[in-house]
Amino acid sequence: MTTDIVILAAGQGTRMRSAQPKVLHPLGGKPLLEHVLETAQNLQPRQLHVVIGNGAELVKKQGSDWSVQWWHQHKQQGTGDALRAALPGLNGADRVLVLYGDVPLLTSDTLQAFLAETPKDAVGLSTAMLEQPQGYGRIVRNAQGQVLAIREQKDCNAQEQTIAEVNLGMMVLPVAPLHDWLADLSANNAQGEFYLTDVVATAHDRQHSVWPFTFQDASEALGVNDPIQLAALERIYQRRQVMQLQRQGLRLADPERLDIRGSLHCGQDCWLDPNVLCIGKVRLGDRVRIGMGVVLQDVDIADDVEVLPYSVLEGAHIGAGARIGPFARIRPGSDIGVAAHIGNYVEVKASRIGAGSKANHLTYIGDSEIGTGVNVGAGTITCNYDGVNKHKTLIGNDVFVGSATQLVAPVKVGDGATIGAGSTITKDVAAGGLTLSRSPQRSVPDWQRPKRQPK
């Protein structure tokens, strides 16, 4: 059977109290809708459809790279009306799997089982048994256990509200009769909307099998209606990722205090202290240690690296055995060499630092190439920007740069050179020897410091 997938993402999300469409609110660094799309694409449907309404242009702009067919629900009149909008695109499919753009925790394995266990031409329902079913539509069965209907919470009578079996929302529907079923929907209910769930009663009345599929983990079907629920799903999502990494051998001081907004790949024997934040694509080699409060964004860290607390690394490569921090900032385009040291309050931007080189204190290195075995003294800065253009600083191997040096780019320092502390270097420095530039020191005897005059 050919299967299409329709994701309903047109709702306004008024309880989010936000101008941003609900399905674009982030979970784990990605929009809610993107999570659902990725899961849906893993099922390899014939065609993937998204029904949009509120904030439609913003959603389409965010999803411009997604391979989907867009449909507009111009007036939000319920889930049944939303699926109607996508009906023209379903021609040629045998059945359709209906998902929701604000239900991001679904797994491909669960949905694959849902599809596999729903017979041909049957209506497949996603259900769960809940101790506290408040807020969910109830599964109404007859004495023989057959599903007769789904009753939304607001339309349940007292007896129906005691039913523990609930509808989780996802459905598998045969396409051939779907046009007629949706045309017969009525808005005569507490919400005044066309409920997609009402097709269950229609299907039963017209001798179509209704096939419930019980989710083993009902948390997969949790949706987002307000910021409180979004925060709760964030914790579930993070816990899921962390547990998978722990199964692969990652050691964590506190699993509850690692946040991953993208992907994290770890080698063997890695250790992370609390409050580490990973953004984008982060790769750790073997035996990497990450200190408390470190932010890693789109970085590739080789074996045996130690990143000390409260450092921020973005868009960089860190060579094996390097030591970064504490309180260091490595900015995009930087390549830190093998066994190099970048210390506290050191900032590196778009620079290459050679193997074994060190900048341990209070230093700015920008748009530079530094060779091997170089020592950059405290308070050194590369003056790489003239107000209009960026310029390069080139430092050879085995160079010693004294403290409080200013290197005014473009400038080149030869191998083995020594630059005296407090120098301002505006011309190329020859290899070997000592270079320094200082104003003469003088003292004024008996000089009196100015005193504050009384008011």
Image (tube, rainbow, N blue to C red):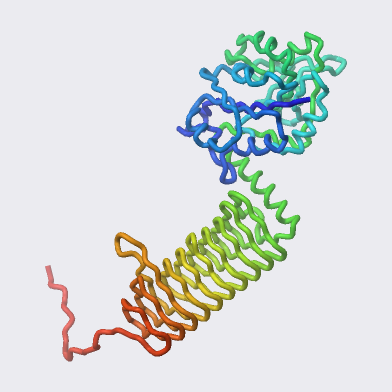
Residue 188 shows in the view:
yes
- x then y, percent, for residue 422: 33, 81
For the point 42% across and 88% down, which residue is it?
A: 432
* Count of labels in the image: 0
- Residue 433 in the image: above or below residue 332: below
Which is nearer the eye, 120 or 428?
428
Identify the image quadrant of residue 46: top right
Residue 134 shows in the view:
no
Identify the image quadrant of residue 385: bottom left
- Residue 195 in the image: above or below residue 229: above
Relative placement, left or right, of 381 versus 30 is: left
Identify the image quadrant of residue 128: top right
State the residue lying farthest toward the right.
144
- Residue 366 in the image: above or below residue 379: above
Which is nearer the eye, 233 or 449?
233
- x then y, percent, for residue 164: 76, 26
For the point 13% across and 72% down, which residue is it?
A: 453
**Picture quarter with the C terminus:** bottom left
- Residue 266 in the image: above or below residue 237: below
**Picture quarter with the N terminus:** top right
For the point 49% across and 67% down, which residue is it?
A: 328
Which is nearer the eye, 13 or 209?
209
- x then y, percent, for residue 281: 60, 53
Which is nearer the eye, 388 or 138?
388
- x then y, percent, for residue 20: 48, 34
For the point 66% across and 64% down, which residue is it?
A: 285
Relative placement, left or right, of 320 versus 170 is: left
